[in-house]
Amino acid sequence: MKRSVDLVVIGTGEAGSTVATHCRAAGWEVAIVDSRAYGGTCGLRVCDPKKVLVGAAEIIDWERRMKEKGIKSDDTVIDWPELIRFKRTFTDPFPKAREDSFKQAGIATFHGPVRFSTNRSLQVGDDLLEAKHTVVATGAWPTRLNIPGEEHLTLSDQFLELDTLPKRIVFVGGGYIAFEFSHVAARAGSQVTILHQGEQPLEAFDPDLVARLMERTRALGIDVHTKTKATAVGRSAGHLTVRASVGSDLQTFEADLVVHAAGRTPEIAELNLPAAGVEFDGHGVRVNEYLQSVSNSAVYAAGDAANGGGWPNTPGAEYEGALAARNLLEGNKYKTNFLGMASVVFTVPPLARVGMLEEDARRQGLKFKVNTADIASWYSSRRVAEPCAAFKVLVEEGSGRILGAHLLGPDADELTNIFVLAVRAGLSAETLKESVFVYPTQASNLQWML
């Protein structure tokens, strides 16, 4: 069947859904297509289901920290099968709910692999969609490691569907997935190992705070190996083995489960982008500051599929989706502005970042002061017996502008949002210090951080 529309959106995650609903609300004829279940990465495979598991780990950790401080309980454990059943109450209904919302809005829905036929037409099974505009919002997928035995790796979405949790787990990679999932698995009783080929895991975050989180991680019994590159995965005698190079040496790690945690790449390989004259690279569709393809003016990209310079996370995807929709509807008037975008690693405790790292600020020749401290002894950390808490805030000399904020400890994920507002709106450190926040809360610590 052949159908002509104003817009085809490829992908039903946060970026694609935002574009589609905005343009449909403006009266455009919109079609949306996905080769996977509707809902995208965040709602089905990472953010939302992961946070359900993290919540359980937080309860276990809090109870352990508060022993001999007024809390007495020796039988609280994570019932993994029951936790996964609870997680599924969020994920199982989600694809249908999202698709129903599209249909109710008058958006035509299509399922299956999609490929460009020409610069303005796409093939979805037996359907040919001709579009005035197309938005690529396909998200990201685990990067191929190209090592022998790669087929034995468990992907993050598969980990979130495990009915039982294996005793020995190895995570290949040292990013968000490795640390977040390992903090959950360790508190659920598994023996966990992380293999990271670089010198510092969580490379996008402040190295001093990462070092503190590493200490906390190892204190949980998680075995973290840096400068260790997985070279092969094998299966024998009912278990898996991971061979890894450590400098000129080789090591072997045994496990019941080996999880791919070595990064994600834009899922655009099957779209036949050359047929549409769309330039791309390993970071996604090459776009300009309006999120428009640099080589095909009819195509835009948003979220993880776009090489636009933003954080690969849900808020970034929603922001880019909304911006792409505005530029489609009104002409290219709105440029990307990633100032103040934040990112969080949902370990226990969480690690957060907004704005620049020290090395970023120095590279730009900025003059700034660094306010930093271990705050495990502060009331907000001590009352919950959290030994891992620290901050680092970069304040520009003269202007008092907050260049970056880096937080580790209880509620760091929530406190970061105040710094997001400050950096985005250009609020000075003095303005924040003069604000009267509710006490005792994490926000009431701000005046001492600035």
Image: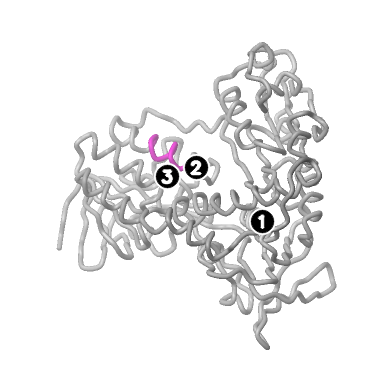
Q: Is residue 260 left or right of residue 252?
A: left
Q: Amino acid at mark 3?
A: Ala
- Residue located 70% across and 60% down the image: 186
Q: Amino acid at mark 1?
A: Thr
Which residue is tagged 1? 76
Which residue is tagged 3? 302
Kindly indicate whether the residue at mark 3 contacts the one at mark 2 (C-beta within 8 angstroms). yes
Q: Is residue 31 left or right of residue 261?
A: left
* Residue 317 drawn in magenta: yes
> Which element is circle 2 on?
loop
| Residue nearest the viewer, comparing 139 with 385 | 385
Q: CA distance from mark 2 to mark 1?
A: 45 Å
Q: Residues within 10 Å of mark 1 (few under 14, many from 20)?
A: few
What span is in magenta? 316-323
Which residue is tagged 2? 308
In this picture the colour scheme is: one colour
